[in-house]
Amino acid sequence: MQTPSVAPRLPGLNPSLVRRATLVLSVYLAVMLIAVLYHFLQSRAEGQAGYDFRYFWVAGRVWLEGLSPYGPDLPRLSAEMIPEGHVPRIWPYPPTLWLPTAFPALFPFETAWRIWLGLHGVAMILASAVIAVGLPALRISLGAGGEFAVPRPLFFALHLGLMAYGEANLLSANSGQVTGLLYLGAAVMMVGLYHDRDKTAIVGLTILLMKPHIGAAVALGLLISGARGRRLVLWAAVASVVLMLPALAIAPTAIFDWLRGLARYDGENSANLPEAMTGLRNLLWEFGGLTLGNLAASLAGLAVSGVIAVWLCRKDRRGEAPLTDEGRLTRLSAAMILAALAAAPLHLYDFVLLGVALPLLPLLAPTRVCAALIAILMLTRPCYLHVQVTGELPTQIFVGSTFATLGAAVLLAVLLVPAPVAGLRRPAPL
């Protein structure tokens, strides 16, 4: 039984009338936000295809032609396939992305770009809907012992507005990244965990593993959590191998080719410099003047996630947090996603994944509400805040990486504070 959402009780007002008014407002906001999102994506589709989309489309075309995008011929093949603009010279993504790249490659370049943006918009809408319906109702303290459970339709509209118009999603849509799919996968995984639906959780985790920097952190946390978590990771690993089979049939060494390519990707362009990336790599450069490679930063971020997972699992086993087993795994996975955002070397467009953690934040104290609001502001407008606060442009791209990293760290602290996560303790049936 899931904790129901309730409308706010206001003195002198009919609760039924308040619920109806809230529903009407929610539908209006949702329709307006979806319409604006559609027009934004439509205008973007009429422009030049995104920088990152070119990588996905070319890789898919190369796969479909029976060749490997990890090979030395990729620059030549890219130049032959793309009529103008940036030409990819390296394929830095894992072979599990064979299917998401092969599908748009079935269409001509410009058509595929429009389809790609349309699917991204659908993924953003579905992710907010899955989170609003499937995760606990967000509860906010009103002071004096009162609290307000945000009605689910209103939460959907507000959540979609926050996630769709944050800088992370705008960057993702402009560049044509695949983060919309990963975000939807993370939402599906969290709902599967919370409702004890292992098959659903496995599907979501398999999608999330397509982004190893984040998926590996979640998988590590689940491995540490116990037998159920290990079973989920095992089946997600099997599903990932199945997704790689078409790529492995073409290039049996695709996994090793991908790992070798990562080492060459550090300085491939300005987006992969420490100042343009997030996590420990960015913080070490920003505050210590140290340069760390992506591979070393990835391992360090994974170590941070492991420490947090061990601490959280030991804390839960001691019974300090009165949560259900499903609640423990849900909170653990949300913590792992935030830990990856705070520690792993990522880009700002990856921060759309913070949306899956928002309903799980414990906001039943004014200090937590304030901390969460500050962190969310840092995460939704990091580039704007960096320019306004510092007046500097450390790089031409992703200038808000440090602000986003620190915002994720604050949000992680809010989630990990020693208090039950709102809504995760289900009431016993009557």
Image (spheres, rainbow, N blue to C red):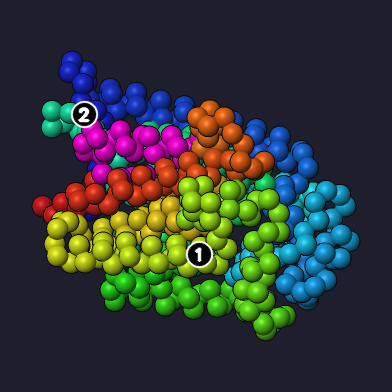
Is 222 on the left-hand or right-hand side of 253?
left
The amino acid type of the residue labelled 1 equals: Ser
Q: Earlier in the sequence, mark 1 or mark 2?
A: 2
Q: Residues within 10 Å of mark 2 (few under 14, many from 20)?
A: few
Location of residue 265 in the rendering, given as x and y in whole percent from the top left corner:
67, 63
Q: Nearer the viewer, residue 287 or 157?
A: 287
Q: Identify the residue position indicated by label 1 in the image.
A: 298
Q: Residue furthest top?
A: 12
Q: Which residues are magenta?
A: 358-381
Location of residue 172 in the rendering, given as x and y in whole percent from the top left corner:
61, 46
Q: Is residue 122 visible?
A: no
Q: Are discs 1 and 2 less than 8 Å apart at CB?
A: no
Q: Residue at x 48, y 41 (%)?
A: 403
Q: Nearer the viewer, residue 282 or 158?
A: 282
Q: Residue at x 36, y 76 (%)?
A: 231
Which element carries disc 1, helix, strand or loop? helix
Q: Residue at x 45, y 37 (%)?
A: 378
Residue 191 lies in magenta, yes or no? no
Q: Identify the residue position indicated by label 2 in the image.
A: 142
Q: Nearer the viewer, residue 402 or 428?
A: 402
Q: Residues within 10 Å of mark 1 (few under 14, many from 20)?
A: many
The amino acid type of the residue labelled 2 equals: Leu
Count of numbered labels shown in the rendering: 2
Disc 1 from disc 2: Cα separation: 40 Å
Location of residue 178 in the rendering, given as x and y in whole percent from the top left corner:
61, 54
Magenta part, dominant SS: helix
Q: Residue furthest front?
A: 289
Q: Residue at x 48, y 76 (%)?
A: 237
